[in-house]
Amino acid sequence: MKLQLLSDLHLETEDFAPQPVPGADVLVLAGDIDASWQGFERFADWPVPVLFVAGNHEFDGRELSLAWPALRAEAHRLGWTMLERESTILQDTAGQRVRFVGTIRWSDFDLFGLSNRDGTMRAAGYFMRLMRATLHGADFDAAAVRDESLACRAWLHSTLMEPADGRWDKTVVVTHFAPSLLSADPRYGKQPGTASFCNADDDLLSWADLWLHGHLHCRHDYQVPRPGRAPTRVVCQARGLAQKGEDLGYDSDKLIEI
């Protein structure tokens, strides 16, 4: 199965017109496509199935308890499959069954350990003020983000532990937030704010054959060894902001094979 992966397009401010890639079996949208949602129309009537995992900027200025069902309704209208703490199985023309496991994941701020959590949560305050979101009428602050993140993590762990029992051949995880410090943006490295972009989900990587994510405005394609098995491949194909030069070297036509 060949996948086209797009994320961090930020069509609310960026002028970019993605095109279907010949040979792709599935389009995966890994979040931060358009904070206004208007750019979603570019992916209506896409020639292959579209799997969508939301990013944090899909909720800018919104009340999450209302935005989630509205976002799901919009995905349904466009013919997408939205995955939030959900999985789906797709079969390619060769008969391979691929399980896609998807959640936004959010940040739990434990990237650098418990002793550094307070510092990473303070650093997150800047990003949450920019986001201006609420949850049940209260500010969607770092503490609320952590609560949501832990629920995502618990679901992800439980789902990845499920035995295949002949139902699928490969597992692809799709999250918006990165699963490892290995995905950190090299421009910023190890600093408290990095915990707003990466989680320490390294212990879960071995349960996936492929892990796709966004959120970092840079590209990654690396492998994590699994004893006795093929390594887990981790891919981030974020475009980022052209106004900052983050799109240099970006290849929207890259195909990822599983």
Image: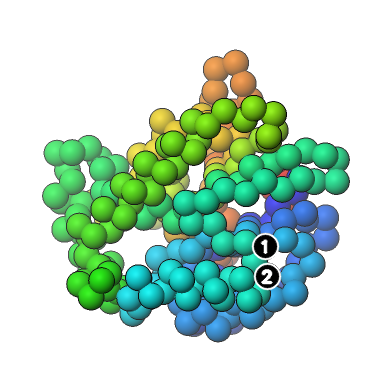
Q: Residue at x 20, y 57 (%)?
A: 143
Dot label at residue 79: 2
Q: Amino acid at mark 1?
A: Val
Q: Residue at x 55, y 74 (%)?
A: 73
Q: Which residue is mark 1?
A: 50
Q: Residue at x 50, y 72 (%)?
A: 71
Q: Nearer the viewer, residue 192 or 114?
A: 114
Residue 115 image-quadrant placement: top left
Residue 18 image-quadrant placement: bottom right
In x, y percent, where is residue 126?
Answer: 23, 67
Give the mark nearer the N terminus: 1 vs 2: 1
Against 229, residue 157 (above or below) is: below
| Mark 1 to mark 2 CA distance (whole Å) | 8 Å
- The nearer-to-camera label among 1 and 2 is 2
Query: Callout 2: 10 Å neighbours few (<14), some, many (20+)?
Result: some
* Residue at disc 2, secondary structure: loop
